Image: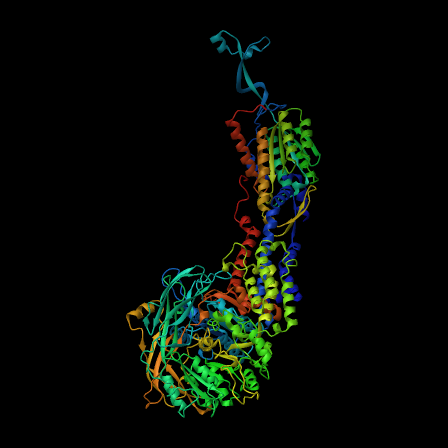
């Protein structure tokens, strides 16, 4: 028992080797231009020295003549310079919901643990790409803030941050996201790990605020399998979390209505995220995390290669 | 359901039912206490779902709860009969006994006319009995069925436990049953069946059921006896199976078929004279809702009499019409034997054998078969009552036995017999004069009439014989005189009405010379006619004004009219003596003036203004007569006043002004005054006694009384009707009185069907029937078939001897088809050695009450309302159903029990099963297992 408690208190438990092995061959790239502080693998809003040609521009006084395209001059007798895409590293902020509702779990992991594992795995992946990773945990307020850093040792800080917070109180998503947006001076990637059992309007406003500040937003929506399937039978007293009232009922009788409400909620969240240009990923806590992340990264890569890069 | 209702009204039963009904609720509440706890994050969806589905869930749960409560209640209801009665679930009765009474009267021959030749009501009734028995055969409880016909209540036709073989016996028996052609009331058979049920099966565990298969006509319930029969306290369940057509539906009183019927047939005299026309009448009733016409055919001795037959153009609905026709009877083969005394002289009764003379007198009579047939083309209604028969006795003259109390050795020639004999037409009457002592020796059955002239007290044997004669249909006429014994007459009145009224102890006193002179000067009639419409006085009525010259001095006053007034018809009366007294006369005049005072009510009523002018003229005439005229003129004026009609109206049918309600009291007072002014002691009275009639003339037949009468006074004149100024009217008085006695009572011929009894043959030691002719009644299709064949059948008849009273033998003539309506004429010899042939006849007609097919209303038949007032609530012991509707549960195990405990009905079991299925479905639906198992969580989530 003591050994198990010790394991539960070990922050590195979120770095599941099986998961990391599953995603180790993959990379997480930003879909849109991000402003990094190092040269990296992510598109930058600035022109630089990458191999990716972007455009020709008429020469103006002061331009470096090394960039003149002499082939064009020979054909047109006019001076044009060649511009190439700059590449930078990514500033990713992991926003993890640690509110009370995230403490529910019918399987081996609660939603919070699942979210922490997913966030830690993402942090490991990004740090391995030389990207900077930060962490924000929140419930009714921000509980932990770790600014983005690209050092490898920053991973320990992140997993420690994920392990420290206990599920508490009701989520106030709008205030949290507003504060996150204000604390991120340059555009980067914001990954939200939450069950989104919050006010939908506030959630949409928060994401919208991030998008307006040119951040790329990825929403990892976590739900327990019980919350999705609602498999309860027999008289059950459901005790509400986050100040919601209790309800004694025959769950089988309510299942149909519950599922209908849940479906409406999921559609609303999905459509809101899509409308705002945020990437939405639904995660069931009973699914293997490596498979889920692998699928997510593959889909993301496929989308990046297929479509034009959004400039925010 | 009374028992069931009583059970539910019990407070303990209510508490038990409440406990039962609350079981599902308790189970539900217990289940609510056993739940598990789950800390739940997605509570908002759950709350929203609960809010959204709350109404549907509550409805489903309530339905489920209701179905479970009902299930529990129904199950408890099923078990209750065992728990309450404490008996095991075995058949509830040891025996079920069905007492079945079958109405076999003529009205059951009515058939359906809804197309084609339908079965008659009787066949429907038999089918209904068979259905009842077939249902009983499949019963687990032993069922016994007893059957009797209404026409023969004492005879049980079938009494066996219903099984396969006994059912076949019953079926065969039913096929052989035939309707009886006479009027039958089921009352007696029902009473008998009920008595047998109560007496022979007193066990409590025997369920008794009494079934009446009848057409339930209103006529059967008109007297309401059946209401009295039915009593729930007797423990007998009643079912009346209505067999009438059209079948009884929901209507309380279904429309009945119309029917034309000859309901009566008669003649003006029960004795017809050979060759003398006699008027007959037939009464035709239209028991329908539409006016009809029909042809009335008359047959005499089996041959159609076209001159008497006639078309009846209008038969108003719901009414009867009397059709009169005249026939000329003939004696046919009867021996034309003159049976009067050899000399026929009054006052010289010969020393002859009265029985032999009677026999000869009987042999002179013949019988004539008269049949009327109503030919109705519509084909609606009963056919059996379209024919009616009667037998007329035909004689050459009317045989009259005249018993004269004054005939004795040395009698005066001016006796009553002399004047009475002179008054009789020798062509019509055949009188035999005998003295009082010979009355007992005479064969009274050979006489049509017996006249008693101034007789004193008769021997008891003679009185008994005379009384039997009158009761049997004979006519007896009394003429009073000084030998009349008032004590004897009053005894005769008390002992069955042989004398029609009570006499005072003394006759009216003889008049003095002065009184006689005053009487001569009196201009008023000496005889008044209380009922001018009576046929007895119709011949005298034209002479009414000259009756002021009649000398009527003495008579026997009647006393205590309250004891005989209702039964006696006063045909003639003496004038009121009160008018002769000045004081009483003036008082009567004042009363008339007061009644007719026009300035008093009701003549001052404005409503009478239109008729007052007509009244004023007539009242003026009365006033003037009162001032100047005598008794007769005043009465005449008052009678004219009572006939007054409104001005401009001359139709007597339209009524008089006195028909107005305001004038009815005045009219009644005026009629009373007329009687008071006019009428004194009765003079000629008559009354009916049994089948016969008696008549009394309360003065003498001759002018003077005999010497040495019981009054003991000197001989004197009683009246001068036979020899005075009005002697020409005396034969009218005598003959009309005798003809009146010969008039038959209205229903005398409706009851003729019976074997010919001792009155006809009993006087003979060893009669031999030589011939019997039977005229069967064939109606409808039978009649047409019969016309091709002989309508007269010669049938063998046999004489059956029964011991009569007084040690004499009584004989009855029986023929084989005697229960079929028709006519029988027969001839027989009083003994094998006799050369005399006597003839008689008998007719058998359908009862008149069978003709009216109007259906009884349910409220008239259903006795429960009345019985509940006495016996308390309970409505399950009586049912009235269309025939053939026999429920399976009623025939065996469930008889009575079905009504008392609805838990026996299979419908309850079926309802329980259906409810169980509904409950299971609701429970499955409310468990939502169909949604929770094997279905994806939701679309689009993966």
Does residue B935 lie above or below B339 as drawn?
above
Q: Nearer the viewer, residue B340 or B249?
A: B340
**Position of residue B548 measured from the top left corner of the image (x, y, whole percent):** 53, 73
Q: Residue at x 61, y 39 (%)?
A: A222
**Position of residue B661 measured from the top left corner of the image (x, y, whole percent):** 59, 60
User: How many labels, in total?
Assistant: 0
Does residue B722 lie above or below B677 as drawn?
below
**Position of residue B850 measured from the top left corner of the image (x, y, whole percent):** 45, 69
Does residue A208 lie above or below B118 as drawn?
above
Residue B891: in sight, yes or no?
no
Quarter of the figure that contains the N terminus of chain B = bottom right
**Position of residue B835 measured from the top left corner of the image (x, y, whole percent):** 32, 88
Q: Residue B379, located in which quarter of the rendered image?
A: bottom left
Does residue B459 lie above or below A302 as drawn?
below
Residue A223: in sight, yes or no?
yes
Q: Nearer the viewer, residue A291 or B385?
A: B385
Quarter of the figure that contains the C terminus of chain B = top right
Q: Residue furthest top?
A: A77
Snapshot colouring: rainbow
Task: Judge left or right: residue B855 versus residue B671.
Answer: left
Q: Residue B8, located in which quarter of the rendered image?
A: bottom right
Q: Residue furthest left?
A: B788
Q: Residue at x 29, y 73 (%)?
A: B790
Task: Judge left or right: residue B384 versus residue B232.
Answer: left
Task: Judge left or right: residue B735 versus residue A79.
Answer: left
Q: Nearer the viewer, residue B723 or B665?
A: B723
Q: Nearer the viewer, residue A181 or B113?
A: B113
């Amino acid at each position: 028992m003591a050994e198990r408690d010790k394991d539960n208190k070990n922050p590195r438990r979120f770095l599941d080797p099986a998961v990391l092995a599953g995603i180790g061959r993959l990379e997480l790239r930003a879909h849109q231009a991000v402003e990094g502080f190092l040269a990296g693998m992510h598109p930058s809003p600035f022109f630089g020295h990458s191999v990716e040609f972007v455009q020709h521009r008429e020469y103006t006084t002061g331009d470096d003549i090394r960039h003149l395209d002499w082939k064009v001059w020979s054909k047109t007798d006019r001076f044009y310079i060649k511009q190439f895409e700059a590449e930078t590293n990514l500033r990713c902020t992991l926003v993890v919901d640690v509110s009370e509702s995230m403490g529910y779990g019918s399987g081996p992991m609660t939603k919070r643990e699942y979210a922490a594992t997913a966030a830690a795995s993402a942090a490991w992946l990004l740090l391995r790409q030389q990207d900077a990773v930060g962490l924000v945990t929140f419930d009714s307020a921000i509980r932990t803030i770790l600014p983005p850093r690209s050092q490898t040792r920053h991973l320990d800080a992140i997993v420690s941050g994920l392990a420290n917070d206990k599920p508490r109180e009701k989520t106030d998503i709008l205030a949290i996201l507003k504060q996150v947006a204000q604390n991120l001076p340059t555009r980067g990637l914001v990954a939200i790990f939450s069950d989104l059992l919050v006010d939908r309007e506030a959630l949409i406003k928060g994401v919208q605020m991030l998008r307006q500040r040119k951040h790329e937003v990825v929403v990892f929506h976590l739900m327990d399998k019980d919350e999705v399937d609602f498999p309860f039978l027999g008289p059950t007293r459901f005790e509400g979390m986050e100040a919601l009232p209790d309800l004694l009922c025959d769950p089988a009788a309510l299942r149909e209505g519950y599922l209908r409400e849940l479906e409406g909620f999921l559609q609303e969240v999905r459509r809101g995220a899509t409308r705002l240009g945020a990437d939405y990923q639904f995660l069931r806590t009973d699914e293997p995390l490596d498979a889920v992340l692998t699928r997510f990264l593959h889909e993301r890569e496929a989308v990046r290669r297929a479509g034009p890069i959004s400039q925010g | 359901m009374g028992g069931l209702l009583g059970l539910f009204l019990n407070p303990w039963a209510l508490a038990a039912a409440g406990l039962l009904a609350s079981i599902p609720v308790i189970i539900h509440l217990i289940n609510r206490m056993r739940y598990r706890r789950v800390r739940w994050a997605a509570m908002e969806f759950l709350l929203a779902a609960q809010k959204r589905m709350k109404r549907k869930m509550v409805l489903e749960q309530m339905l489920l709860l209701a179905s479970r409560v009902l299930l529990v209640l129904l199950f408890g209801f099923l078990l209750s009969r065992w728990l309450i009665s404490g008996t095991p679930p075995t058949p509830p009765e040891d025996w079920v006994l069905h007492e079945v009474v079958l109405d076999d009267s003529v009205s059951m021959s009515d058939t359906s006319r809804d197309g084609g030749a339908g079965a008659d009501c009787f066949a429907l009734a038999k089918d209904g009995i068979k259905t009842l028995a077939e249902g009983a055969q499949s019963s687990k409880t032993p069922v016994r069925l007893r059957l009797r016909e209404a026409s023969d209540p004492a005879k049980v036709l079938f009494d066996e436990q219903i099984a396969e073989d006994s059912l076949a016996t019953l079926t065969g028996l039913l096929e052989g049953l035939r309707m009886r052609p006479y009027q039958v009331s089921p009352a007696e058979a029902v009473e008998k069946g009920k008595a047998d049920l109560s007496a022979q099966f007193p066990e409590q565990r025997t369920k008794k059921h009494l079934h009446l298969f009848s057409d339930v006509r209103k006529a059967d319930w008109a007297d309401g006896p059946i209401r009295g029969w039915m009593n729930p306290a007797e423990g007998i369940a009643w079912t009346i199976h209505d067999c009438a057509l059209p079948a009884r539906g929901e209507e309380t009183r279904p429309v009945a078929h119309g029917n034309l019927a000859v309901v009566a047939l008669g003649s003006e005299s029960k004795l017809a004279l050979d060759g003398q026309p006699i008027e007959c009448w037939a009464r035709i009733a239209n028991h329908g809702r539409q006016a009809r016409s029909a042809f009335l055919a008359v047959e005499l001795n089996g041959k159609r009499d076209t001159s008497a037959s006639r078309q009846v153009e209008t038969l108003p609905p719901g009414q009867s019409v009397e059709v009169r026709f005249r026939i000329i009877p003939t004696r046919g083969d009867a021996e034309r034997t003159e049976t009067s005394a050899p000399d026929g002289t009054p006052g010289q009764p010969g020393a002859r054998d009265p029985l032999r003379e009677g026999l000869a007198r009987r042999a002179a009579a013949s019988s004539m078969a008269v049949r009327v047939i109503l030919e109705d083309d519509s084909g609606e209604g009963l056919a059996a009552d379209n024919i009616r028969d009667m037998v007329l006795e035909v004689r050459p003259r009317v045989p009259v036995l005249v018993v004269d109390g004054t005939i004795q050795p040395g009698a005066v020639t001016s006796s009553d017999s002399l004047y009475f004999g002179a008054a009789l037409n020798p062509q019509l009457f055949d009188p035999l004069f005998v003295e009082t002592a010979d009355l007992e020796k005479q064969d009274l059955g050979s006489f049509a009439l017996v006249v008693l002239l101034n007789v004193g007290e008769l021997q008891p044997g003679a009185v008994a014989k005379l009384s039997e004669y009158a009761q049997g249909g004979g006519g007896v006429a009394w003429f009073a005189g000084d030998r009349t014994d008032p004590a004897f007459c009053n005894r005769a009145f008390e002992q069955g009405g042989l004398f029609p009224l009570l006499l005072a102890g003394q006759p009216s006193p003889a008049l003095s010379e002065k009184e006689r002179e005053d009487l001569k000067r009196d201009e008023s009639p000496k005889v008044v006619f209380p009922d001018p419409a009576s046929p007895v006085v119709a011949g005298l009525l034209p002479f009414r004004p000259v009756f002021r010259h009649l000398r009527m001095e003495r008579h026997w006053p009647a006393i205590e009219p309250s004891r005989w007034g209702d039964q006696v018809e006063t045909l003639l009366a003496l004038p009121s003596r009160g008018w002769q007294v000045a004081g009483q006369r003036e008082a009567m005049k004042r009363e008339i003036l007061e009644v007719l005072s026009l300035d008093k009510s009701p003549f001052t009523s404005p409503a009478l203004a239109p008729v007052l002018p007509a009244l004023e003229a007539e009242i003026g005439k009365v006033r003037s007569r009162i001032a100047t005229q005598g008794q007769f003129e005043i009465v005449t004026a008052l009678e004219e006043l009572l006939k007054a009609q409104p001005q401009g109206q001359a139709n007597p049918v339209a009524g008089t002004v006195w028909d107005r309600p305001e004038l009815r009291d005045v009219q009644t007072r005026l009629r009373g005054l007329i009687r008071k002014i006019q009428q004194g002691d009765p003079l000629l009275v008559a009354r009916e006694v049994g089948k016969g009639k008696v008549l009394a003339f309360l003065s003498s037949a001759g002018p003077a009384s005999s010497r040495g009468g019981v009054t003991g006074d000197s001989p004197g004149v009683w009246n001068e009707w036979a020899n005075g100024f009005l002697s020409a009217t005396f034969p009218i008085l005598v003959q009309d009185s005798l003809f009146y006695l010969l008039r038959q009572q209205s229903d005398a011929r409706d009851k003729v069907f019976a074997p010919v009894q001792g009155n006809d043959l009993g006087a003979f030691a060893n009669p031999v029937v030589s011939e019997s002719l039977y005229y069967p009644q064939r109606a409808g299709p039978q009649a047409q078939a019969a016309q091709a064949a002989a309508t007269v059948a010669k049938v063998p008849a046999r004489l059956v001897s029964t011991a009569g009273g007084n040690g004499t033998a009584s004989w009855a003539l029986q023929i084989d088809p005697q229960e079929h309506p028709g006519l029988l004429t027969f001839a027989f010899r009083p003994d094998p050695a006799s050369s005399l042939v006597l003839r008689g006849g008998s007719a058998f007609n359908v009862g008149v009450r069978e003709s009216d097919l109007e259906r009884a209303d349910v409220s008239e038949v259903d006795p429960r309302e009345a019985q509940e007032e006495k016996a308390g609530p309970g409505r399950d012991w009586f049912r009235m159903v269309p025939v053939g509707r026999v429920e399976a549960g009623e025939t065996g195990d469930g008889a009575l029990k079905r009504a008392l405990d609805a838990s026996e009905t299979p419908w309850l079991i079926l309802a329980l099963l259906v409810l169980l299925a509904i409950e299971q479905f609701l429970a499955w639906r409310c468990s939502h297992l169909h949604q929770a198992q094997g279905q994806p969580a939701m679309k689009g989530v993966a």
